[in-house]
Amino acid sequence: MLSNSNNQTSPQPVSNLAPVANILPANTPMPLACDACDLEQDYSMRHLRSLPELVCQHCGDRRRFSGLELTTLESALNHMGYYLSKSV
Ligand SMILES: [Zn+2]
């Protein structure tokens, strides 16, 4: 009894073709808007990667920068063709 009808084809989309990769150094300033007063403030990627507590220069609002935000920020940069230098 041979039943060989189990043909599983799982196509894997290949979309890793970034035309130009721009490497950003770890001290690149990233403007982040404050939740409370909506004013932007620059933080370096090196600083953000340590998941610091961010204190707004303008209104003094403090909040924790989360790992999820870091991931979101990095993937957004990747979509724009920028890659962050992992070496500090
Ligand atoms: Zn603020």
Image (cartoon, rainbow, N blue to C red):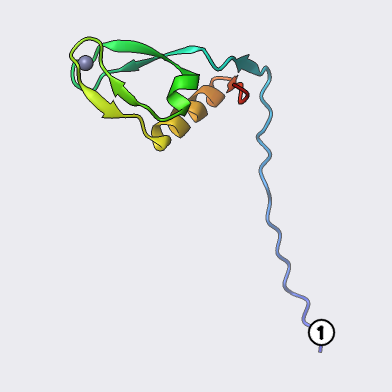
Specify whether 54 is left or right of 87: left
The quarter of the picture where residue 18 lies is top right
Q: Ligand 1 within 8 A of label 1's CB?
A: no
Quadrant including the C terminus: top right
Residue 40 at x, y percent in the picture:
30, 11
12 or 84: which is nearer to us?
A: 84
> Within 10 Å of the Cα at label 1, are there few (<14), some (14-19), or many (20+) other Cα atoms?
few
Q: Residue at x 66, y 43 (%)?
A: 13
Please tell me how many numbered marks the rendered image carries.
Answer: 1
Quadrant including the N terminus: bottom right
The quarter of the picture where residue 73 lies is top left
Q: Residue at x 51, y 30 (%)?
A: 75
**Where does ligand 1 appear, by image quarter?**
top left
Amino acid carrying mark 1 in the image: Leu
The quarter of the picture where residue 15 lies is top right
Using the image, determine if residue 31 lies above or below residue 68: above
Q: Residue furthest bottom?
A: 1
51 or 42: which is nearer to us?
A: 51
Under tag 1, what secondary structure?
Answer: loop
Specify whether 6 is left or right of 61: right
- Residue for badge 1: 2
73 or 2: which is nearer to us?
A: 73
Residue 77 at x, y percent in the picture:
51, 22
